[in-house]
Amino acid sequence: MKINQMTRALKSGLITALLSYSCASYANPDKFYANPALQSTAPAAFALSPQNAPWLKQAHQQRSQHAQQFFKALKGEDKLFNSLLDWANVSFEQRMALLPSVFNIECQALAMICPELVINNTLYPSRAVNFVFDVRNPGSGLVFLNPDKLKTMDTYAPLAFLIHETRHAYQFQLGFSQQTLLAKGYQAAFTAQAELSGYSFSDFLTLLNEYEAFQFGNHVIGLLTQWRVDMTDMGTFTSQFGDNAQLKIDLLKLASANDHHTLLESYNQRAQAQYRLRSQQ
């Protein structure tokens, strides 16, 4: 879809956009923790649903494989790769200029149709980032980055969000073109994202598409930085890695713990550390 078509679709209510980086810290626990009542309305869409354990296992395997493929492809572009390794010392303007090259390599590495990429401060002036999609008329999607908003954020935010939003395009294209286990999960997640409301922070970010896209982006940043950068603002702890390259909250391990709690309850218990962290911001 062209930008004007996307805008008309947005106005007609057919598109739901990504919850942006600038979401509140959610000092109110009701707005932070996962809500079983909401998630039970679309269990196929959420990473905390027990029925999605096979999906999680397959998604973890694919995420690791794709992150390594993408990293290897980036490594093949010497000048770009050296700039990515020196990202903290590159000016903001140079960082933004590098993003289209990273975008094109990600599309190639994932063997996907490149979505439309828009980097300006006018298409969605109030948003930092956006993946624009229409579940009623699936296409390749649109990735939007707002330089004015990104400039105020963490050093790695532009790169991490470019990777994250482009991963959404891969998910969306897969979800609406195949009937595999992963595809069905992504389709359920994008549909729930478009149709449901009342999400808490954890609800939204444990949608399968958000959970996996944050995990994928954080994995790639980890490879580029040798896991020295803590991506504290990128998703829940289920999508973030520690300096040991292990997930802070590993849902696969949590699901197999058999501690007489539901996976959602176990997640909420372990998410208290992130809640306290965000409440202090």
Image (tube, rainbow, N blue to C red):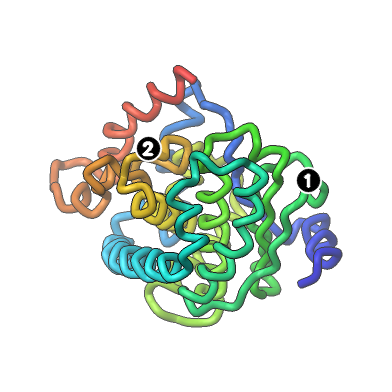
Q: Is residue 40 visible?
A: no
Residue beneath the point at 37% across and 64% down:
67
Q: Residue furthest bottom?
A: 178
- Side of 71 relative to 254 (left or right): right
Mark 2 residue type? Asp
Q: Is residue 279 visible?
A: yes
The image's mark for residue 121 is 1
Tag on residue 260?
none
Residue at 37%, 39% (x, y): give it. Answer: 229
Disc 1 marks a residue whose amino acid type is Asn
Location of residue 79 with respect to 154 vertically, above or below: below
Pinpoint residue 192: horizontal percent, then vertical percent.
Answer: 55, 57
Residue 147: image location, x then y, percent: 70, 44
Name the secondary structure under disc 1. Answer: loop
Q: Whole-Å distance between the Cαs marked 1 and 2?
A: 27 Å
Q: Could you say which quadrant of the image residue 125 lies in?
A: top right
Which element carries disc 2, helix, strand or loop? loop
Of residue 172 and residue 44, the one placed in the foreground of this image is 172
Look at 64% across and 68% down and name the residue there. 135
Q: Is residue 153 left or right of residue 122?
A: left
Mark 2 lies on residue: 230
In the shown orientation, is residue 120 left or right of residue 257?
A: right
Mark with earlier residue (1, 2): 1
Q: Quadrant of residue 190?
A: bottom right
Q: Quadrant of the N terminus?
A: bottom right
| Neighbourhood count class around disc 2 (C-alpha, 10 Å): few under 14, some 14–19, many 20 upward | some
> Are there few (<14), some (14-19), or many (20+) residues within 10 Å of tag 1?
some
Residue occupying the point 48% across, 28% down: 30
Residue 6 in percent (x, y) is at 78, 64
